[in-house]
């Protein structure tokens, strides 16, 4: 697998990372919101697996697209259609509907996709299977929990509103951060924390998998789906998306300590979720979409490579 580069599709705000193997193009599609979102970036399987394709002249397939992870309310149908690949795969995609929405969540056709793996248990379409977010393979989920409390919010004002920094200061929390931190900075900020208050799906996901207690503040169905994935009770302190005053009240309530959830066996869950992703990769090989898929071991060099790619699109 060689020649990695980024191109844009659609309105130009969604880069597609493209790799080449044996004359076949593999396009990896996920959300690239502004500002930077470390969860959306790390949820692509390209960070954790090396993909080897069959020669395009042998099977007539010269373009494969993988959508995921992240939230796509149409399950990625729109972005996959823009890319126009011959074979399409969903890997760890979920949905995010406002709690007040009456949208029919079952009204979607995934006929464009050859193989589907959802991160949400409540997606019951018969052609798919459960595949938790592939970022479980990142060793960020192995950072030991510390003794302190931290608040980590979604940096996007559409999710958290404005002036949250001023509101957080009066709660006495000394460790704060956002999902716009670089991967390196997030690791450093999480290390001393054992109790996490967050409205970020991925920060909650990594925190639970690493044995931390999490008080979840949320604005959409993806937060309930996350707790359902772990088999935890649906304890989400809700607020209207983008309403910073409501978010501040929910965060203050969460910090009181009555709403924390924690996995009984985080290491066991971590291993299970990792194996589910490995099994999904093996299925893609058995279905002859790929000649081989090899798991990559994370290391500082790969992290530096990720940071360089991010700098092509963001200032982190």
Image (cartoon, rainbow, N blue to C red):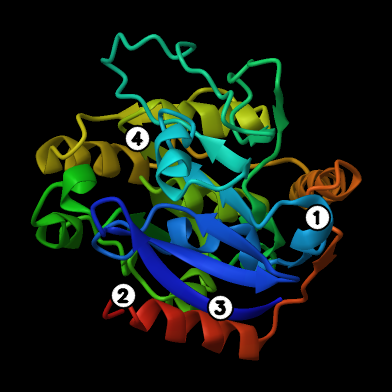
Which of the two discs, 4 and 3, labels the residue nearer the N terminus?
Answer: 3
Query: Which numbered circle lies on residue 257?
Result: none
Name which residue lies at 78% across and 48% down. 289
Which of the two discs, 3 and 1, labels the residue nearer the N terminus?
Answer: 3
How packed mark 2 is, by other alpha carbons closer than 10 Å (few <14, some 14-19, many 20 or more), is some
Camera-side mark, 2 or 1: 1
> Which corner quadrant of the image does residue 229 belong to?
top right
- Give the distance between the C-alpha atoms of the residues marked 3 and 1, in whole angstroms: 18 Å
Camera-side mark, 2 or 4: 2
Q: Which residue is mark 1?
A: 290
Q: Nearest the camera: 311 or 90?
A: 90
Which quadrant is the C terminus positioned in? bottom left
Say whether marks 2 and 1 touch (CB < 8 Å).
no
Residue 210, image x and y in percent? 66, 58
- Quick check: can you spot residue 149? yes
Callout 2 secondary element: loop
How packed mark 3 is, by other alpha carbons closer than 10 Å (few <14, some 14-19, many 20 or more), is few
Camera-side mark, 4 or 3: 3
- Give the distance between the C-alpha atoms of the residues marked 4 and 1, in whole angstroms: 38 Å
> Which corner quadrant of the image does residue 258 belong to?
top left
Name which residue lies at 55% across and 48% down. 85
Q: Nearest the camera: 95 or 151?
A: 95
Which of the two discs, 4 and 1, labels the residue nearer the N terminus?
Answer: 4
- Give the distance between the C-alpha atoms of the residues marked 2 and 1, in whole angstroms: 29 Å
Which of the two discs, 2 and 1, labels the residue nearer the N terminus?
Answer: 1
Residue 238, image x and y in percent? 30, 28
Q: Left or right of 215: which side holds 243?
A: left
Q: Which residue is mark 3?
A: 4
- Give the distance between the C-alpha atoms of the residues marked 4 and 3, in whole angstroms: 36 Å
Which quadrant is the N terminus positioned in? bottom right
Name which residue lies at 52% across and 72% down. 192
Q: Which residue is mark 4?
A: 218
């Amino acid at each position: 697998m060689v020649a990695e580069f980024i191109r844009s599709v659609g309105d130009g705000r969604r880069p597609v990372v493209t790799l080449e193997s044996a004359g076949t193009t593999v396009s990896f599609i996920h959300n690239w919101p502004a500002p930077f979102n470390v969860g959306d970036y790390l949820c692509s399987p390209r960070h954790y697996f090396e993909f080897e394709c069959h020669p395009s002249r042998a099977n007539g397939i010269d373009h494969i697209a993988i959508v995921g992870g992240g939230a796509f309310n149409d399950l990625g149908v729109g972005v996959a259609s823009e890319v126009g690949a011959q074979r399409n795969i969903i890997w760890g995609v979920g949905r995010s509907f406002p709690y007040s929405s009456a949208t029919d969540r079952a009204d979607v056709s995934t006929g464009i996709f050859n193989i589907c793996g959802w991160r949400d248990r409540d997606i019951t379409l018969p052609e798919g299977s459960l595949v938790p977010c592939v970022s479980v393979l990142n060793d960020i989920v192995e950072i030991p929990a510390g003794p302190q409390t931290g608040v980590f919010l979604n940096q996007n004002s559409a999710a958290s509103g404005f002036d949250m920094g001023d509101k957080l200061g009066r709660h006495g929390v000394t460790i704060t951060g956002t999902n716009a931190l670089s991967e390196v900075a997030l690791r450093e900020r999480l290390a001393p924390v054992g109790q996490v208050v967050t409205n970020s799906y991925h920060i909650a996901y990594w925190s639970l998998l690493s044995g931390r207690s999490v008080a979840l503040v949320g604005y959409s169905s993806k937060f309930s789906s996350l707790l359902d994935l772990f088999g935890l009770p649906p304890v989400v302190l809700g607020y209207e998306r983008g309403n910073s005053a409501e978010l501040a009240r929910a965060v203050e309530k969460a910090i009181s300590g009555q709403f924390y959830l924690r996995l009984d066996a985080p290491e066991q869950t971590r291993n299970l979720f990792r194996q589910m992703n490995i099994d999904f990769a093996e299925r893609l090989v058995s279905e002859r979409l790929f000649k081989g898929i090899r798991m990559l071991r994370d290391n500082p060099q790969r992290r530096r490579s990720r940071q360089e790619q991010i700098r092509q699109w963001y200032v982190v």
